[in-house]
Amino acid sequence: MERLLIIDDDVELCALVRENIESEGFEVEAVHEPEQGLTKVRSGIYSLLILDVMMPGMSGFDVLRKIRAMPSTLPVLLLTARGDEVDRIVGLELGADDYLAKPFHPRELVARIRAILRRTHTPATEATPERQMGMLQVGDVELDRGTRSVMRGKRALELTALEFDILRHLLENAGRVVSRDQLAEAVMGKTLSPFDRSIDMHISKIRRKLGERPGRQLIKTIRNAGYIFVLASARG
Protein backbone atom coordinates (compact mmCIF):
# COMPACT_ATOMS: atom_id res chain seq x y z
CA MET A 1 0.00 0.00 0.00
CA GLU A 2 1.31 3.44 -0.97
CA ARG A 3 1.98 5.73 1.99
CA LEU A 4 1.29 9.43 1.44
CA LEU A 5 2.11 12.46 3.60
CA ILE A 6 0.12 15.70 3.82
CA ILE A 7 1.65 18.90 5.23
CA ASP A 8 -1.10 21.51 5.67
CA ASP A 9 -2.06 23.71 8.62
CA ASP A 10 -5.78 23.46 7.72
CA VAL A 11 -6.92 20.65 10.04
CA GLU A 12 -10.41 20.34 8.55
CA LEU A 13 -9.13 20.19 4.98
CA CYS A 14 -6.54 17.57 5.96
CA ALA A 15 -9.24 15.42 7.52
CA LEU A 16 -11.40 15.66 4.39
CA VAL A 17 -8.50 14.98 2.02
CA ARG A 18 -7.30 12.09 4.14
CA GLU A 19 -10.76 10.50 4.17
CA ASN A 20 -11.08 10.73 0.40
CA ILE A 21 -7.58 9.42 -0.31
CA GLU A 22 -7.81 6.54 2.15
CA SER A 23 -11.07 5.44 0.54
CA GLU A 24 -9.03 4.91 -2.65
CA GLY A 25 -6.70 2.46 -0.95
CA PHE A 26 -3.85 4.71 0.15
CA GLU A 27 -2.31 4.97 3.59
CA VAL A 28 -2.27 8.65 4.60
CA GLU A 29 -0.60 10.62 7.37
CA ALA A 30 -1.25 14.33 7.92
CA VAL A 31 0.81 16.83 9.90
CA HIS A 32 0.08 20.51 10.45
CA GLU A 33 3.52 21.84 11.39
CA PRO A 34 6.10 22.26 8.60
CA GLU A 35 9.07 21.27 10.77
CA GLN A 36 7.28 18.11 11.85
CA GLY A 37 6.55 17.41 8.21
CA LEU A 38 10.23 17.75 7.29
CA THR A 39 11.13 15.25 9.98
CA LYS A 40 8.60 12.83 8.46
CA VAL A 41 10.02 13.38 4.97
CA ARG A 42 13.54 12.53 6.19
CA SER A 43 12.31 9.08 7.22
CA GLY A 44 12.08 8.15 3.53
CA ILE A 45 8.96 6.01 4.01
CA TYR A 46 6.53 8.01 1.86
CA SER A 47 5.71 7.64 -1.82
CA LEU A 48 4.36 11.16 -2.30
CA LEU A 49 3.96 14.47 -0.43
CA ILE A 50 0.91 16.74 -0.68
CA LEU A 51 2.14 20.17 0.37
CA ASP A 52 0.19 23.37 0.96
CA VAL A 53 1.81 26.66 -0.06
CA MET A 54 0.13 29.02 2.40
CA MET A 55 1.22 28.08 5.93
CA PRO A 56 2.21 30.38 8.80
CA GLY A 57 5.80 30.44 9.99
CA MET A 58 7.23 28.40 7.15
CA SER A 59 5.60 28.46 3.74
CA GLY A 60 5.24 25.46 1.50
CA PHE A 61 7.92 26.99 -0.72
CA ASP A 62 10.37 27.00 2.20
CA VAL A 63 9.51 23.37 2.93
CA LEU A 64 10.02 22.45 -0.72
CA ARG A 65 13.41 24.19 -0.82
CA LYS A 66 14.54 22.17 2.18
CA ILE A 67 13.30 18.91 0.66
CA ARG A 68 15.07 19.53 -2.64
CA ALA A 69 18.26 20.30 -0.72
CA MET A 70 18.06 16.81 0.83
CA PRO A 71 19.21 13.65 -0.92
CA SER A 72 15.52 12.98 -1.65
CA THR A 73 13.52 12.47 -4.85
CA LEU A 74 10.16 12.41 -3.05
CA PRO A 75 7.45 13.52 -5.52
CA VAL A 76 5.62 16.66 -4.36
CA LEU A 77 2.09 17.73 -5.29
CA LEU A 78 1.68 21.39 -4.40
CA LEU A 79 -1.65 22.89 -3.29
CA THR A 80 -1.90 26.49 -4.47
CA ALA A 81 -4.41 29.33 -4.33
CA ARG A 82 -6.84 29.28 -7.24
CA GLY A 83 -5.76 31.51 -10.10
CA ASP A 84 -2.39 32.37 -8.53
CA GLU A 85 -0.08 31.70 -11.46
CA VAL A 86 2.93 33.04 -9.56
CA ASP A 87 2.58 30.31 -6.93
CA ARG A 88 2.49 27.67 -9.62
CA ILE A 89 5.55 29.01 -11.44
CA VAL A 90 7.58 29.37 -8.24
CA GLY A 91 6.56 25.89 -7.12
CA LEU A 92 7.65 24.32 -10.40
CA GLU A 93 10.94 26.22 -10.32
CA LEU A 94 11.61 24.85 -6.84
CA GLY A 95 10.99 21.28 -7.94
CA ALA A 96 7.30 20.50 -7.42
CA ASP A 97 6.11 17.64 -9.63
CA ASP A 98 2.59 18.98 -10.11
CA TYR A 99 0.17 21.47 -8.61
CA LEU A 100 -3.52 21.65 -7.83
CA ALA A 101 -5.48 24.81 -7.14
CA LYS A 102 -7.82 25.11 -4.17
CA PRO A 103 -10.68 24.42 -3.96
CA PHE A 104 -10.42 21.14 -5.84
CA HIS A 105 -12.58 18.10 -6.43
CA PRO A 106 -11.41 15.04 -4.45
CA ARG A 107 -11.50 12.89 -7.58
CA GLU A 108 -9.12 15.26 -9.34
CA LEU A 109 -6.72 15.08 -6.39
CA VAL A 110 -6.77 11.28 -6.51
CA ALA A 111 -6.25 11.34 -10.30
CA ARG A 112 -3.21 13.61 -9.90
CA ILE A 113 -1.79 11.37 -7.18
CA ARG A 114 -2.20 8.25 -9.29
CA ALA A 115 -0.60 9.96 -12.32
CA ILE A 116 2.45 11.00 -10.27
CA LEU A 117 2.84 7.54 -8.75
CA ARG A 118 2.52 5.85 -12.15
CA ARG A 119 5.37 7.86 -13.59
CA THR A 120 7.67 7.65 -10.56
CA HIS A 121 7.68 3.89 -10.30
CA THR A 122 6.30 0.81 -11.99
CA PRO A 123 5.18 -2.18 -9.85
CA ALA A 124 7.34 -5.24 -10.36
CA THR A 125 4.37 -7.19 -11.70
CA GLU A 126 3.92 -4.64 -14.48
CA ALA A 127 7.51 -3.67 -15.26
CA THR A 128 9.13 -5.05 -18.39
CA PRO A 129 12.82 -6.00 -18.45
CA GLU A 130 13.44 -2.93 -20.63
CA ARG A 131 11.84 -0.59 -18.10
CA GLN A 132 13.58 -2.27 -15.18
CA MET A 133 17.08 -2.51 -16.65
CA GLY A 134 17.13 -0.39 -19.83
CA MET A 135 19.84 2.17 -20.41
CA LEU A 136 19.48 5.17 -22.67
CA GLN A 137 22.49 7.05 -23.97
CA VAL A 138 22.64 9.97 -26.37
CA GLY A 139 26.06 11.56 -26.67
CA ASP A 140 27.48 11.98 -23.18
CA VAL A 141 24.07 11.81 -21.47
CA GLU A 142 23.29 8.42 -19.97
CA LEU A 143 19.98 7.56 -18.28
CA ASP A 144 19.31 4.38 -16.32
CA ARG A 145 15.61 3.49 -16.21
CA GLY A 146 16.12 0.92 -13.49
CA THR A 147 17.91 3.11 -10.94
CA ARG A 148 16.30 6.32 -12.23
CA SER A 149 19.69 7.97 -12.40
CA VAL A 150 21.25 10.28 -14.99
CA MET A 151 24.89 10.99 -15.78
CA ARG A 152 26.40 13.57 -18.09
CA GLY A 153 29.95 12.53 -18.66
CA LYS A 154 31.23 11.65 -15.19
CA ARG A 155 28.81 14.01 -13.43
CA ALA A 156 25.65 12.69 -11.77
CA LEU A 157 22.57 14.89 -12.20
CA GLU A 158 20.10 15.44 -9.38
CA LEU A 159 16.68 15.43 -11.08
CA THR A 160 13.22 15.40 -9.58
CA ALA A 161 10.95 12.50 -10.49
CA LEU A 162 9.13 14.56 -13.11
CA GLU A 163 12.33 16.01 -14.58
CA PHE A 164 13.68 12.47 -14.93
CA ASP A 165 10.59 11.34 -16.83
CA ILE A 166 10.61 14.36 -19.14
CA LEU A 167 14.26 13.76 -19.98
CA ARG A 168 13.63 10.03 -20.42
CA HIS A 169 10.81 10.70 -22.89
CA LEU A 170 12.98 13.15 -24.85
CA LEU A 171 15.88 10.70 -24.96
CA GLU A 172 13.59 7.89 -26.10
CA ASN A 173 12.57 10.19 -28.95
CA ALA A 174 15.99 11.76 -29.58
CA GLY A 175 16.18 13.39 -32.99
CA ARG A 176 12.39 13.80 -33.17
CA VAL A 177 10.25 16.74 -32.13
CA VAL A 178 8.00 16.10 -29.12
CA SER A 179 5.19 18.59 -28.53
CA ARG A 180 4.36 20.05 -25.13
CA ASP A 181 1.03 18.27 -25.20
CA GLN A 182 2.69 14.93 -25.94
CA LEU A 183 5.09 15.43 -23.04
CA ALA A 184 2.27 16.38 -20.66
CA GLU A 185 0.21 13.35 -21.63
CA ALA A 186 3.16 10.96 -21.48
CA VAL A 187 4.72 12.04 -18.18
CA MET A 188 2.03 13.96 -16.30
CA GLY A 189 -1.06 12.13 -17.47
CA LYS A 190 -2.94 15.33 -18.22
CA THR A 191 -3.81 17.77 -21.00
CA LEU A 192 -2.30 21.23 -20.76
CA SER A 193 -4.54 24.28 -20.62
CA PRO A 194 -3.76 27.01 -23.23
CA PHE A 195 -1.74 29.08 -20.73
CA ASP A 196 -0.09 26.26 -18.79
CA ARG A 197 3.69 26.68 -19.09
CA SER A 198 4.63 23.98 -16.58
CA ILE A 199 6.41 21.83 -19.18
CA ASP A 200 8.51 24.82 -20.24
CA MET A 201 9.49 25.46 -16.62
CA HIS A 202 10.62 21.87 -16.16
CA ILE A 203 12.57 21.91 -19.44
CA SER A 204 14.35 25.08 -18.29
CA LYS A 205 15.41 23.38 -15.06
CA ILE A 206 16.60 20.26 -16.89
CA ARG A 207 18.70 22.42 -19.21
CA ARG A 208 20.39 24.13 -16.27
CA LYS A 209 21.16 20.78 -14.65
CA LEU A 210 22.57 19.44 -17.91
CA GLY A 211 24.91 22.44 -17.94
CA GLU A 212 23.84 23.67 -21.35
CA ARG A 213 25.63 26.67 -22.84
CA PRO A 214 24.40 29.17 -25.47
CA GLY A 215 24.81 27.64 -28.89
CA ARG A 216 25.41 24.18 -27.41
CA GLN A 217 21.91 23.15 -26.42
CA LEU A 218 21.06 19.49 -26.01
CA ILE A 219 17.33 20.23 -25.79
CA LYS A 220 16.24 22.64 -28.50
CA THR A 221 12.96 24.53 -28.64
CA ILE A 222 11.22 24.17 -32.00
CA ARG A 223 8.96 27.20 -32.36
CA ASN A 224 5.25 26.34 -32.35
CA ALA A 225 6.11 22.64 -32.32
CA GLY A 226 7.77 21.54 -29.08
CA TYR A 227 11.19 20.23 -28.06
CA ILE A 228 13.84 17.96 -29.51
CA PHE A 229 16.80 16.25 -27.85
CA VAL A 230 19.52 16.80 -30.42
CA LEU A 231 21.50 13.79 -31.60
CA ALA A 232 25.25 14.08 -31.01
CA SER A 233 25.96 13.98 -34.75
CA ALA A 234 23.71 17.02 -35.32
CA ARG A 235 25.22 19.28 -32.64
CA GLY A 236 27.31 22.24 -33.62
Image (tube, rainbow, N blue to C red):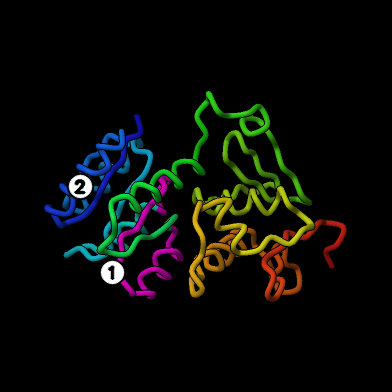
Q: Which quarter of the rendered picture does the N terminus lie within?
A: top left
- Left or right, 62 with respect to 167, comes to left
For the residue marked with disc 1, what is the amino acid? Ala
Res. 107 visible in picture:
yes
Name the residue nearer the viewer: 106 or 8.
106
The region drawn magenta spans 68-95
SS of the residue under disc 1 = strand
Q: Which residue is mark 2?
A: 36
Q: Is residue 72 visible?
A: no
What residue is at 51 percent from the left and 60 percent from the top?
191
- Residue 64 belongs to the span the image colors magenta: no
Residue drawn 29% across and 56% down? 105
Q: In the rendered view, would you say 19 is above or below 92?
A: above
Q: Position of residue 177 (x, y in %)?
A: 73, 62
Q: Position of residue 164 (x, y in %)?
A: 57, 49
Q: Mark 1, mark 2: which one is toward the viewer?
A: 1
Left or right: 138, with 59 as reference point: right
Label 1 crowd (10 A; few <14 / some 14-19 / many >=20): some
Q: Which residue, given by chain and number where applicable, does mark 1 sit on?
A: 81
**Pointer 1 or 2: first along the chain:** 2
79 left or right of 140 in image: left
Alpha-carbon span between mark 1 and mark 2: 23 Å
Q: Residue at x 30, y 37 (%)?
A: 24
Q: Amino acid at mark 2?
A: Gln
Task: Find residue 144 and report its image quarter.
Answer: top right
Please report the residue visible at 25 percent of the width from the left and 48 percent of the height from the top. 6
Query: In front here: 109 or 121?
Result: 109
Residue 202: percent from the left, percent from the top?
Answer: 53, 62
